[in-house]
Amino acid sequence: EERLELFFSQSLDGFFFMMLDKPIQWDDAVDKEKALEYIFAHQSVTKVNDAMLDQYKATREQFLGLTPNDFFKHDLEQGRRVWRDFFDAGQLHIETDERRLDGTQMWIEGDHICLHDSQGRITGHFGVQRDITERKRAEEQLRESEERFATFMNNTSMLAWMKDEDLHYVFLNQAFERQQAVTLAAIRGKDDFAIWDAKTAQSLQEHDRIVLQSGRVLETEETVPDQQGELHYSLVIKF
């Protein structure tokens, strides 16, 4: 017990218990919406470690006693949905949009498990959670960057594409899609042999490999047929 207490208190992840003031039955025989009203007002934090207090920028005195109504007052609908899914399953791994005590937004990744009494009623739950706000911001910045890149590429008449190190397509712009009558969704993860005849595909990949092996920009001429067999001659810059 002493070792568990030491682990609880010194973990870098947030650990906590939220207990109900009385056990509740949770099955198809109960009115779950009515039960949630009670849970959100009467399930409260009874134990918390320092790591979780740091996540919420709170003191222990401020944090103990907080209820789901407090944690999700910015979005009660989200909170009720999360709690219902959690209690239905008995355990849950989830990412949630939450607020620190100072009102600033944070994203939480958490693992939660219900606690039951001898009659199978829910008495509360134990949770482990970590602050993933910086990861979420980085993901959002990447998404916005990719959207700007796609917007730029799709508003040029020049053909543009990207391949990975295995020469599989990961991006085509709309001009490419129109000329070759293919879509990114259909060609993503495939190579030139999925679009052109073997001779053309081999020629294109030879140029690609020169770029990969040398690490330099290559300016060259390439000839490719469209879906009607008409040849297109292009000055291509690969890097």
Image: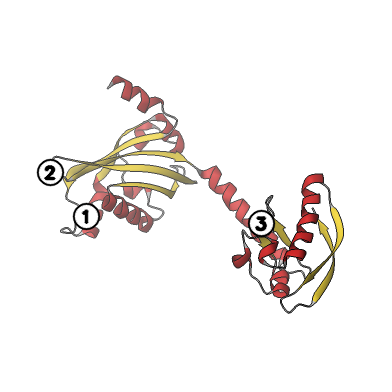
Helix, strand or loop status at disc 2: loop
In front: 184, or 10? 184
Q: Which mark is residue 35?
A: 1
Give whichever of 180, 67 is nearer the camera.
180
Q: Position of residue 154 (x, y in %)?
A: 71, 68
Kind of residue sitting beneath label 3? His
Q: Residue at x 27, y 50 (%)?
A: 87
Q: Which residue does the image show at 33% across and 43% down from the upper left?
A: 112
Q: Position of residue 14 (x, y in %)?
A: 40, 35
Cα gap from disc 1 to disc 2, whole angstroms: 17 Å
Residue 41 at what x, y percent from top left? 26, 49
Secondary structure at badge 3 equals loop
Does the residue at mark 2 contact the one at mark 3 (Cβ under 8 Å)? no
Q: Which residue is mark 2?
A: 119
Q: Is residue 18 left or right of residue 129?
A: left
> Could you tell me which residue is drawn at 25 percent across and 50 percent down?
39
Q: Is residue 20 left or right of residue 224?
A: left
Give the residue furthest to the top. 2
- Residue type for callout 2: Gln
Q: CA distance from mark 2 to mark 3?
A: 57 Å
Residue 70 place in picture, x, y as percent: 35, 47
In terms of sequence position, does the residue under pointer 1 or pointer 2 come before the other?
A: 1
Give the mark nearer the N terminus: 2 vs 3: 2
Mark 1 is on which residue type? Ala
Rendered image: mark on residue 168: 3
